[in-house]
Amino acid sequence: MRLRTWSFCLSEANQNLLRNPVLAIASITTTAVSLLVLGMFLLLTANVNQITSNIENQVAVRAFFKQSTKTAQEQSALAEVRKWPKVRSAKIITRQEALRQLKSEFGDQASVLNSLGTANPLEDSLSVTAKSPADVAPLAKSLGNLTGVVKVSYQSQVVTRLFSLINAIRIVGLGIGILLLLGALLVINNAIRLGIVSRRREIAIMRLVGATESLVHWPFILEGLILGLIGSVLAAVIAWWGYAALYTGAAHSLPFVPLVTPIPTARDVAVLIVVLGVLLGAVGFRLSVRRLARV
Amino acid sequence: MRLRTWSFCLSEANQNLLRNPVLAIASITTTAVSLLVLGMFLLLTANVNQITSNIENQVAVRAFFKQSTKTAQEQSALAEVRKWPKVRSAKIITRQEALRQLKSEFGDQASVLNSLGTANPLEDSLSVTAKSPADVAPLAKSLGNLTGVVKVSYQSQVVTRLFSLINAIRIVGLGIGILLLLGALLVINNAIRLGIVSRRREIAIMRLVGATESLVHWPFILEGLILGLIGSVLAAVIAWWGYAALYTGAAHSLPFVPLVTPIPTARDVAVLIVVLGVLLGAVGFRLSVRRLARV
Amino acid sequence: MISLRNVGKAFPNGVVALRDVDLEISKGEFAFLVGPSGAGKSTLLRLLFREDVPTTGVVSVNGHDVGRMRRRQIPFLRRQIGVVFQDFRLLPQRTVTENIAFALRVVEVHPKEIKRRVAQVLDLVGLPDRAGALPGQLSGGEQQRVALARAMVGRPLVLLADEPTGNLDPVNAAEMMKTLLEINRLGTTVVMATHAAHLVDRARQRVVAMVDGQIRRDELAASYSEGVVE
Amino acid sequence: MISLRNVGKAFPNGVVALRDVDLEISKGEFAFLVGPSGAGKSTLLRLLFREDVPTTGVVSVNGHDVGRMRRRQIPFLRRQIGVVFQDFRLLPQRTVTENIAFALRVVEVHPKEIKRRVAQVLDLVGLPDRAGALPGQLSGGEQQRVALARAMVGRPLVLLADEPTGNLDPVNAAEMMKTLLEINRLGTTVVMATHAAHLVDRARQRVVAMVDGQIRRDELAASYSEGVVE
Ligand SMILES: Nc1ncnc2c1ncn2[C@@H]1O[C@H](COP(=O)(O)OP(=O)(O)OP(=O)(O)O)[C@@H](O)[C@H]1O
Ligand SMILES: Nc1ncnc2c1ncn2[C@@H]1O[C@H](COP(=O)(O)OP(=O)(O)OP(=O)(O)O)[C@@H](O)[C@H]1O
Ligand SMILES: [Mg+2]
Ligand SMILES: [Mg+2]
């Protein structure tokens, strides 16, 4: 198309927006809300991930060796375990290290252990972290079957519950995320279709006086992009600004909540929102072109 | 209105729906998606709450008394602490109980303590649970100032992180929840306004041939209610059915994820969705009546 | 039945469509409203059923001050007035039958009675075979006849017809004219804005001629153009 | 320029609007299309600019087979044809100027040229003072004249006018008729569907009379009714 045609389509799109404020506001607000919810959800996920990845690394299954086990035997067990697909990492903790850890864990109550003197009743152990919390139980079972291993233990109820929580969030969260994206697409697509339907007469008249299909289509495409852009920028600004405010507020009132920092996370989410908004506008339009041709 | 008028309005509403399938489908799907997301969010919240309320009850601040402290003194401290507003519960743990607990906590490694013989190096303590995780730190400080208390300790990093997580979820979650409700209202309101705008001409003609305002309004109200009902029932069915499927699936593949049972929670959420859908339809209409009068 | 006193109408954009119009039309009268395009004929008719309000003066129909009528009263005024609009204004998504029936459904006539009367008027305007068609499936003249059918099906006190023969061939136009005169003979007050000089000349009824928003001429048993004697 | 051979048109609902129509109109000719309401005049015109397609037969305009033309070609056909629609079809949210200019903007005429030509045609139809009004703010006759202005502003090869004087008073109607004949004199082929017998009789041009979807009469320098001799 020529430059004049482009400017024609752009001014058409603009005028349509100004002439149908209800439709424009409806599209912008629904786009903004859909994307804002999606953005908030992403930020929530980022925070959950940050916290859980910290904790996940700490969950280990401990397999204790007989006191008589030789170092070579322990090393070959380690090498084998490292090959298992469910294993994230594995290392050997000697009985000396174990005692040191125990003492430091006891902290204030370490005096209890002073009575031990130089005796060390602990065993060498293999400390293994799983790739996922779901792998912990089968991993423990497998470790129990290793030669030389007399006992397997893994962490307490609190941690198990924590993983329940994380899992519930992730499963439901994935569902919500997909649904939100589909919802946003649907809402934008609906807005475009309604725009087409409510301008049916106008489109027909434009065609009757000799407008080509691209002259009929482009104002809609541009309009969709403009609406998507405004809506998503709005959502992005609110998400970024709101998260930054939340972050500052949390840093003051809840110092022990280590939220993800606004930069880069909230900034990235904001950029993603804008990209998605424009993309959704374009996809929404693609889905409506057939409808437009039928009008 | 007379019965005939009612049936007239209802058949009008019906015919309008059938004649404007685009608008009807747009309204239904946007309502359904908004409410479905809201419903999923409520279910997520219910699960987070179930898990966290379990854990919250377990977080305690321990204030250790000097070994010389008298039982009477300890009891008066207990009585005072129980009056503090931040305290959920408080109890005294004697040094005998403490040792028993320690032994059971050590579990597999309890043999370490055998070397203590009958000696008990532990102190009596006051175990206090806070009403909220945010109260834990100030509570610990206050407890440290009690007479006879030599040392205050509270739980490990994992638990602190857990609370960070819960708090982040709750804060962001509240925001998402409110936004979703507003979003749903907005979407429904927009759909109604668009319906009015796209039927501007028809409404004008109806008025010109002598239709009263109620005859013009009621088909819209009924239409809104029907659309809201269909959309919300759709959302409710998907939410309930989907959650039940998730629950069954989780019970099989992730036995250690103790999800909230579908009945009553998912059922209640489904009912809430339908009520909200109809309510939002009605409120959305109220907000649009002025627009309708201006057409 | 109809009375306008000192009526003026200026639109927000500054156009003055009516200036100081005085007009009395008694019950049962038949009046042609003639004048060049843009003279203010449609505007005058629009004031009578309160599609618009006068800027100055008083418009009254059947004793009611139409310009100052309360909003709630308007539908009841309109039910006493049948209107054939210059641009038809049929509901585009309803069939011919439904369009005509609509005027009766708003007054809660019994469905059986509606059916009977709709069939009757469709017969009168010569369209019984297009009853199930949508307005978009009708020719211009057919739409115009449906508009007349809708205007008269409610047996109104007053019938306002704005250019009701503009899209009709001479034969159909003469038929419609006959129908309007017949309705008038049965007691309905009829005001018809028209450019069809030959119909006006032949009918020999009262002629109100407007130019530029003012009434220039108001004669009984007159013709379209001034000074034409048969 | 225009040729219909064995053209038939039946609508999906069973109505047959055209039956076996043969018609040739040469370049530069002026033809009236007359006939009773529902005869098929508008349907015939609609086939010429491909608003609809014939069920049988071949419609060709300026050498193109309009009925079998590819979708992409349609706009270019339409740019060579100006149409005055029976129901005007003005864009309701655009001013008179914008409505007329639209026909030039789609062919990418330079803005300055557009301005000049729009002013020129507005003058020709006598509406220079309503240039900024929206269609809803115009009288019926004014809208009709805007529709004519839009149809001719593109200097089309063919001008189709469907009942272009239905809402005009005799003086304005005669003016519009004069304009159409002038446009024809400058080389544009004009086909005008009309019920205005006196205009047809006075113009003494070719008359194609239709009844019930068929051509009944096709005479040069004829009058509206058969056998009328001046
Ligand atoms: N809503 C409006 N806003 C501004 N001007 C208007 C409006 N409606 C009508 N007019 C102007 O008022 C004048 C009178 O219009 P009206 O429709 O009454 O004319 P008319 O006598 O019915 O003409 P016609 O015979 O062409 O239908 C016209 O010049 C018209 O442009
Ligand atoms: N889309 C359609 N679907 C079904 N029938 C139609 C459709 N369009 C027109 N018709 C019918 O075809 C016939 C011819 O219509 P057309 O509009 O061509 O008549 P016309 O000669 O222009 O009449 P008028 O002078 O009243 O405008 C009419 O009986 C009409 O009802
Ligand atoms: Mg008028
Ligand atoms: Mg026609």
Image (cartoon, coloured by chain):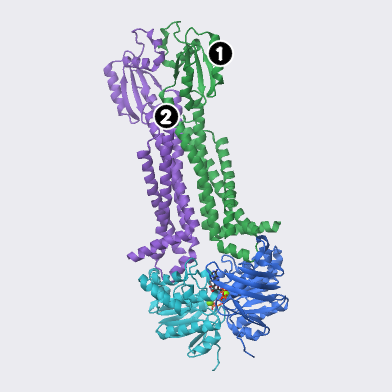
Chain colours: A green, B purple, C cyan, D blue
Residue identifier under label 2: B255
State ligand 4's quadrant. Answer: bottom right
C56 and A226: which is toward the camera: A226
Q: Residue at x 36, y 23 (%)?
A: B143
Q: Is mark 2 within 8 Å of ligand 2?
A: no
Q: CA distance from mark 2 to mark 1?
A: 33 Å
Q: Which mark is residue B144?
A: none
B102 and D155: which is toward the camera: D155
D55 and C223: which is toward the camera: D55
Q: Chain of mark 1?
A: A
Cβ atoms under marks 2 and 1 closer than 8 Å: no
Count neighbours of disc 1 (C-alpha within 10 A) and say few if under 14, some if 14 to 19, many if 20 or more. Answer: few
Where in the figure is residue C186, as x and y percent of width and height?
40, 84
**Tag 2 and tag 1 share a subunit:** no
Q: Residue at x 40, y 7 (%)?
A: A115
Where in the figure is residue B239, as x and y percent of width and height?
42, 43
Name above or below for residue A191 compared with residue A44.
below
Three-letter amino acid code of the residue under disc 2: Pro
Name above or below for residue D213 compared with residue A60.
below
Q: Identify the secondary structure beneath mark 2.
A: loop
Q: Residue furthest top?
A: A118
Q: Chain of mark 2?
A: B
Decide if residue D106 is in sight here: no
Q: Residue furthest bottom?
A: C230
Residue identifier under label 1: A76
Could you tell whether A177 is left or right of D121 in the image? left
Q: Quadrant of residue D29?
A: bottom right
